[in-house]
Image (spheres, rainbow, N blue to C red):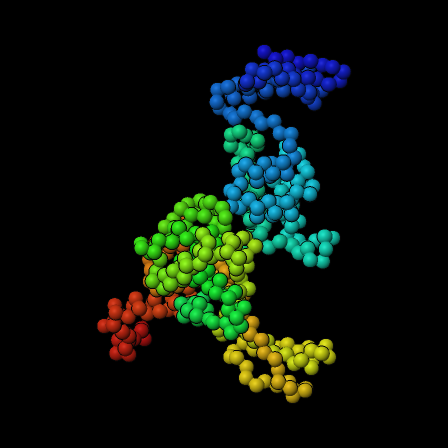
Amino acid sequence: MGHVLQRGRRWYVTWTDAAGVPRRKATRATSRREALALLAELEAQTSRVRLGLEAPPVIVRDSFWSLLDWWLEERCPPASRAMERMRLEKHLKHTELGRTPLALVTADFIERRLEQLEKDRPDEGPTAKGLAPGSINRLRTSLHAAFAAASRPPRRWGAANPVALTRRRRVERKVLRVLSPEEIQRVLAYEATDKRAALHWDSWRGVMAVAAYLGLRKGEILGLRKGDWDARRRTLRVASSYQRAGTKTGRIDELPVPDVLVPYLERAARRRGPWLFPDSRGKPRTRESDPHLVLRTVCAAVGIVDHWELWCRRCKAQGRPLVRQVQQTEPRDVRCSRHHTKLWVRAVPPRIRFHDLRHSCATNLLKAGVPLAHVARVVRHASIRTTNDIYGHLSNEDLRLALDRAYSDSTASHRFTPSHTVSGPK
């Protein structure tokens, strides 16, 4: 049984916790009655812990960043560890929230920091713009995962997850530019005139083909080994990402290879080294590899453009406004109205990402009438809802064709004609 003790003007309570360890704690009680009430509450909590009705309290002495650093080292997935550490160190490590003791971290503190990140921060430089809603949500997801992991044994956090009470930002869905099967064939059939550019594009051609026809992620493609390609069974094993074992989902999948993709894999298998798609030195490509610019350059070369930019070199030399955009067809023999010289023309490709080839693969399969469950298996989504809501970029023309095809046969004998009209009430 515990007891209370007064020393000077401060009251102390002494009791035995659920583990049988004697504990003493200074209180803010101003009288013996208040100290006894606190002692009774602590002994009741100890009884609930012993009976299994309540989790034992966690003694927290670390800072908020110490919890995040522990999560990055012990609980964060290895495939995402480098990116998560860079994001958390940039936005939280050297901030007031990162130095705050973990016991004082609340949902209000976290929400206040997220609101600061949303706003422009001119004190950090002219380029310190606020984060987009999607970036805020990704940061919020990482913090939620850190507290959730700390709440499991061995526990480092004993209260409710404070991130769950913060506000999730609304992200407007953007219309992505996906490539049709005809455009994909034009991109893969491109041949550069310059020898050096041709060699560079040839090293990326197979990577683009695998992304467009099987929907693999960039890291999964660059992590393919020659042993993953079974030419006899025509299957491709997806088991790693870059140089690491394991993919984003942590699964090992075996996918059937379509006929159109077989020549690209056979050609890649004849190269030297253990990797299917290495760099020019035969070494595996890293996360820093950037195929976006390669894809956009080839799209512009084969005529897949968003608009054209025209400018006069004489106007440019004089520092006058010189650029105007043409959205329709490629301009031919356009001249400057001031100097009557022929304008220079530059094709501006759409801002397509390499990951959009994965979206193109799912969209083209859905347009071809492949069942949604089969498409989800090909792109290896855990839920068909992700495939339908995020990767199914069907246009109104696609929906109109589906509706016309669905109703063309069933309503052929019941088409509306003027003789079927029924007069209304007079």
Of 173 and 127, the residue lying toward us = 127
Up/down of 179 relative to 37, above or below: below
Quarter holding the N terminus is top right
- Seen from the viewer's position, the closer of residues 331 and 264 is 264
Quick one: which residue is furthest to the right in this view?
8
Answer whether residue 125 is visible to the viewer in this image. Answer: yes
Left-right relation of 37 to 215: right
User: Residue 309 appears at what percent x and percent y?
Assistant: 59, 76
In the displayed structure image, the side of residue 376 where residue 52 appears, left or right: right
Image height check: is 100 above or below 421? Answer: above
Looking at the picture, how far across and down is residue 251, in whole percent?
Answer: 41, 45
Q: Nearer the viewer, residue 145 or 414?
A: 145
User: Which residue shows up at 56% across the image and 78% down it?
Assistant: 326
* Residue beneath the point at 73% across and 79% down: 318
Pinpoint residue 40: horizontal percent, then vertical percent: 59, 17
Residue 421, position in %: x, y?
28, 76
Number of numbered discs: 0
The residue depicted at 57 percent of the width and 86 percent of the height is 333
Report the residue that reaches farthest toward the left: 413
Q: Is residue 377 visible?
A: no
Q: Residue at x 69, y 82 (%)?
A: 314
Instruction: Check the picture and name the quadrant holding the C terminus.
Output: bottom left
Q: Is residue 188 above or below residue 134?
A: below
Q: Is residue 42 above or below residue 424?
A: above
**Quarter of the figure with residue 128:** bottom right
In front of the other: 221 or 370: 221
Left or right of 371 in this view: 324: right
Extreme-bottom residue of the structure: 340
